[in-house]
Image: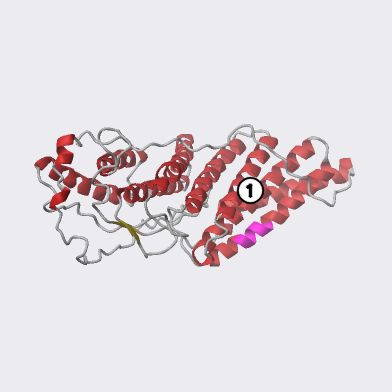
Amino acid sequence: MTHWFHRNPLKATAPVSFNYYGVVTGPSASKICNDLRSSRTRLLELFTDLSCNPEMMKNAADLYFSLLQGFINSLDESTQESKLRYIQNFKWTDTLQGQVPSAQQDAVFELISMGFNVALWYTKYASRLAGKENITEDEAKEVHRSLKIAAGIFKHLKESHVPKLITPAEKGRDLEARLIEAYIIQCQAEAQEVTIARAIELKHAPGLIAALAYETANFYQKADHTLSSLEPVYSAKWRKYLHLKMCFYTAYAYCYHGQTLLASDKCGEAIRSLQEAEKLYAKAETLCKDYGETKGPGPTVKPSGHLFFRKLGNLVKNTLEKCQRENGFIYFQKIPTEAPQLELKANYGLVEPVPFEFPPTSTHWTPETLAAFDLTKRPKDDSAKPKPEEEVKPVKEPDIKPQKDTGCYIS
């Protein structure tokens, strides 16, 4: 598999001790706080652990989220929120805005922010796996599934939890609807890249491959449009990636559509379709250069040197030469001045996010445990007293270099 995916950095967070002196009045409450602290620390460690796999990530995330639910939901499953929802201040950075953190005294903010990082982990795991040499069919399926899981998590956060925040997300922050939507669409588009690679490998009909490529290009265009109103200083690099992938897969669509036209004895139209593919490929090549030179979150690489990119260039060139030869010997058809309209609809292979739900509240939360948190014993001047600022250190992500033959870069 020869894919290359842009990745924004993981979110960073300040440490949380879950120490509530005076408020915690019993051993069961004390144990919950200890378990929250240790499970949160463990989950954060796994984000940068190269040996972590989806099963490990799911188990660690479920443990922490099930414990955190006691700070959010009432135990009687009513619509009331937990009395502990606003007891703790949480700080998180954003994927685009550097190390300037956002802070909210709200457990829902923590649930969404940590869930966001879990989704990012799945996208990075998919990238890492796609970068292996001689990737197996099962591994390709895992790349595909991981991207769909990530899309499902982002979608669930956007639809079911972000609306519950008391303080809405600021413009350009991760929890703003536009940014989450862009992440959802990018995951779908990248999963479809895996579908296209599989369809090409199995020699499916060019018409199906063209339709899938066209739908994928539309996904990238939609994601790019979603980010269009953000400040270029932090969105430019990401948008260059989305734009170049849109051009790249539109070129793919014209290339395979040309093969379909040639098979239907429409050689003149086929040549025009391949010429359009050639033009879009050249445009994508320019965008690759721009991407490498654009400052902003994400890796600094030269995509045009990667195998995934060079393969299409050769395919377009060879297919166009074949069409031109056949037109010169057999068809003698005029070449239209206008490129054919791509009105392609894929009936198979379109990607939908895998539905996601947070786990239910941990069974360690009982009415007795909740009662052992006595909010009347919070220090009277707790809110007035200035607290020392916890430092939010950037996440040190593993520096993974691409394998020499794959053309993949993993951030």
> Is residue 199 visible to us here?
yes
> Left or right of 333: which side holds 149?
left
Instruction: Between residue 354 and residue 192, name the one nearer to us.
Output: 354
Instruction: Between residue 101 and residue 321, name the one nearer to us.
Output: 101
Q: State the residue at coordinates (33%, 52%).
A: 48
> Left or right of 392: which side holds 144?
right
> Left or right of 367: which side holds 111?
right
On-image quarter of the C terminus:
bottom left
Q: Position of residue 194 (x, y in %)?
A: 54, 41
Which residue is the site of mark 1? 249
Q: State the residue at coordinates (67%, 37%).
A: 345
**For residue 47: magenta?**
no
**For residue 286: magenta?**
yes
Q: State the residue at coordinates (25%, 66%).
A: 389
Q: Position of residue 314 (x, y in %)?
A: 67, 51
- Where, by quadrant of the figure, is residue 76 drawn? top left
Span highlighted in magenta in the image = 282-287
The amino acid type found where label 1 is placed reads Tyr
